[in-house]
Image (cartoon, rainbow, N blue to C red):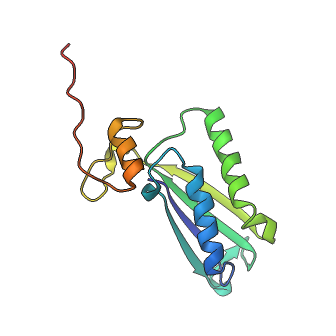
Amino acid sequence: MPLWKIYHPENAFSAQDKQALSQAITALYSRLPKFYVGVVFQEVAKDCFFVGGEPTEKFVRIWVDHIARTLPSPEAKAWWIKACDEAIAPYIGDRGFDWEFHIDETPFDLWSIQGLRPPPANSQAEARWIAENKATPYELPAASPA
């Protein structure tokens, strides 16, 4: 599951802006079930948001947690950072905000949804979760004898 936590100045985004940015973020993960993608907007008052020891009203900080997939190589990481920057720029940078984000990667085996272990990447069960856009019980294919 990707979870994006967006810390931003008060009134930086309207309800429509939040939905549009959430949809742009969700679109980044088109190979995952949409319900995996969570976005939290957290307003931060000017007297509670400091950069370099000074209060700010033009800075957005984003913390991303990845679990469903990890970025396996330096090239994949660079490509992903660029894709994320391009997706959020119209809502943040193009509106005059400075921004920063980072991504944490949690091991896949430390994750559950509705009490279910998510299916393996690119499996038939994951394809069903994508199509149904919800978590449902599944069984892994039996391992072939050695």
Q: Is residue 39 above or below residue 126?
A: below
Residue at the location (64% across, 44% down)?
Answer: 80
Horizontal side of residue 68 vs 86, given as left or right: left
Q: Quadrant of residue 78?
A: top right
Observer-nearest of 100 and 139: 139
The image position of residue 54, as x and y in percent, is 74, 78
The answer to whether 29 is drawn above or below residue 46 in the figure is: above
**Toward the viewer: 132 or 94?**
132
Q: Which residue is at 32% across, 41% downward?
A: 125
Residue plotted at (71% across, 54% down): 85
Residue 68, image x, y percentages: 43, 46
Counting from the top left corner in percent of width and height, residue 133 is at 40, 55
Q: How many marks?
A: 0
**The C terminus is located in which quarter?**
top left
Residue at the farthest top position:
146
- What x and y, as percent, mark residue 28? 59, 51
